[in-house]
Amino acid sequence: MNVLIKGAGVAGLTLAHELVSRGMSVTVRETRETIAGNASWQAGGMLAPWCERASAEPPVLELGRAAADWWDAALPGHVRRNGTLVVTQRRDMAELERFSGRTTGHVPVDATEIETLEPDLAGRFPRGLFFAGEAHLDPRRALLALAAKLAGDGVPFVFGDDARAGLLPGAGADVQADCTGTASGHAELRSVRGEMLILRTPELRLSRPVRLLHPRFPLYIVPREDHHFMVGATMIESSATGPITARSTMELLNAAYALHPAFGEAEIVETGVGLRPAFPDNLPRVEWTGGVLSINGLYRHGFLLAPAMAQKAADLLEGQKERRRSA
Amino acid sequence: MLELYGQHLSSRLLLGTSQYPSPAIMAESIETSGTEIVTVSLRRETAGGKDGGQFWSLIRSLGVKVLPNTAGCHSAKEAVTTAHMAREVFGTDWIKLEVIGNHDTLQPDVFGLVEAAGILSREGFKVFPYTTDDLVVAERLLDAGCEVLMPWCAPIGSARGPQHLDALRSLRAHFPDTPLIVDAGIGRPSHAASVMELGYDAVLLNTAVAQAGDPVQMAAAFAQAIEAGHRAFLAGPLEPRDMAVPSTPVIGQAVFT
C-alpha cells in the first residue's frame, strides 16, 4: 500500500515512521519549504501526561503514557527521562494543592529535595511536586531527526512549490492521510493560538522541565541545548498568526523572572507563534472519511499524543489492507 | 421573573465563558446550568482573529444572550473603546463594564467605573457595572444611568465567598428595586445560596464552575443553589434566636425546672 501523507509536522512524521516500520510505503508532502516553522516547531516537547491531566481529559493520560517509549524507540538518545518539577510561589500555595489534587504520578518535594533535583532553584520554593515518570525531548531536533531517518529509509519528501503543485514522485498513492493541522479546513476544528519565547542564559542550569503554577499566568520552562530555555506558552482562542503581543511577552517574562531572577538578564533569542488545531473537546481524532485518513486536533499535546494517534491510524490502514486482500 | 434592561429571564445564573477545560465542556456546562446570559471577554479571544473565531461561533450556537465584558481594562478610556468594539463584534448594546484599579486584587477602579458608565449610558449602552459593595459608588452608578448593579463579594476568581455580608445586606436594603447581581468571588454553591437568601437577584460566575473538577456537575449544583437561595428569600427565612424553641410539643415533660 502506498500512502501519501500531507503535512510534515509531528502528526505527519510520526505517522510516516509508524507506517514505514510496518512495511508500508509512504510519501510525505509539505507545502512549506522545510520542516521548520509549523505548529510542532513551536512545541515545548514535554512528554508529561500526568501533569497535563490537571486540565485535560482522561484520554490524554491513557494515550500519552507510552509516548516516551515510542520516541525512545524511534529516535534513541533524544528522550530525557528525568521527570517534571512543579513549583509555585509562596503566595500561590493553593494552586499547588489544586494541581496535586487533580493529578497522579507525583510525589511532594520539600526545599531540600527541590535543591537536589535542581540546584539552581535552591531556596526559592518551599514545596513542590515531582513527576518522576515524565520525560521531554527537543521537538525541533526530534522533527529533523525523524525526517532524516525517514529519508534515509527511502521515504520521498516533496516540499514547497512542488508540494503545492501536487507533484508526486513514482507511482500514485492508494490512500491519502491528512496531517495538516489547522490548514485542513475541518469544520469542527478551531485554532488556539500559542506564543512562546526562547531565552538564553548561561547563569542558570535546569535539567528538566519546570512548571510554575500561577493563578493567572501558569508557565513552563524547558531546558534546551547551549543554555537555551523554551518558555511557554499562552493559550488564546484566536486564529491570528501575527507576532507575539507585548502583553504575552510581558506575562511570560514576568513568570520566568519569578521562577528565577537570572532570566532577567537572559537574551531573548526568539519569539514564536503557532496555532494549535483543536476539536471542541480538545481531544485528537483519527478519522476516515471519503477515502482520506486524517489525524488532527492534537491541540497542546502534539509530541505526547501523535505516537498513539499514528498507531491508531496505522491499525486502521492495516485493517483496510486486510479487507482488500480478503475481498 | 428577573428583568434586566427590559429582558425577562427565568434563570438567575449568569456564566462566564473562559478557563473551561474545553469548549465542549463549556457548552455542556452552559446548557446544564440553564443560564440565559453568558459573559464573553472581548480582549484576546477575538482580538486579531480573521473571523471572530470558531470559539465565538460556538457561543453563538448555544442560543443564549451574550453579555460582552471589558475585562482587563485599566482606565475609563480603555473600557469605553473596548465597549465600542464589543458592540460591533457581538451586535449588542449590553456591556459588562470592568475598570480594574489594582492589578493584584483586580479591584474595580470605582472612579473610572462611574466615569465610563456615564459615557456609555449616554451613548445608549445598557451598562452592567462590576463594582465594589460601596453604597455611595452604587448611587453614583445609578445616577450615571446604570439600571443594574454588579457588586463583588470577594476578589475575582478568589473563591472566598461573601466577605462582607453586612455591606451586601445594606446595599440590598438601599436599592430594593434595582436588580443586584453578585459578580465575582463566589467559590461554592453555598456562597451563591447565601447571597441569594439576602435577596440578591442573580449571581455571575466563571472560575468556580470552569475550574471545578467536573464543571458540568458544578454548573448544575450552582443552578440548584441559586434557585434554592432565591426561593428561601421569597419564603422568608427565620431570623436566628438566642432561645431554643422545640419543634415538638413538650406537654407532660418537666421542662420548667
Image (spheres, rainbow, N blue to C red):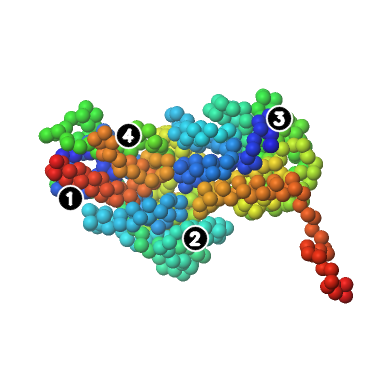
How packed is label 3: few (under 14 Cα within 10 Å), some, or many (20 or more)? many
- Which residue type does callout 3 highlight? Gly
State whether residue A272 is above or below residue A93.
Answer: above
At x 66%, y 40%, the residue is B130
In terms of secondary structure, where does tag 2 sit?
A: helix
Where, quadrant-wise, is the N terminus of chain B in this rendering? top right
State whether residue A302 is above or below residue A91.
Answer: above
Between the C-alphas of marks 3 and 2, the distance is: 45 Å
Q: Which residue is mark 2?
A: A101
Residue at the extreme front of the image, as rendered: B252
Q: Earlier in the sequence, mark 2 or mark 4?
A: 2
Between the C-alphas of marks 4 and 1, the distance is: 26 Å
Between the C-alphas of marks 3 and 4, the distance is: 47 Å
**Residue B29 visible:** yes
| Tags 3 and 1 on a common chain | no
Q: Is residue A181 left or right of residue B161?
A: left
Closer to us: mark 3 or mark 2? 2
How packed is label 4: few (under 14 Cα within 10 Å), some, or many (20 or more)? some
Q: Which residue is mark 1?
A: A21
Chain label for disc 4: A
Q: Earlier in the sequence, mark 4 or mark 1?
A: 1
Chain label for disc 2: A
Q: Are marks 2 and 4 in contact (CB under 8 Å)?
A: no
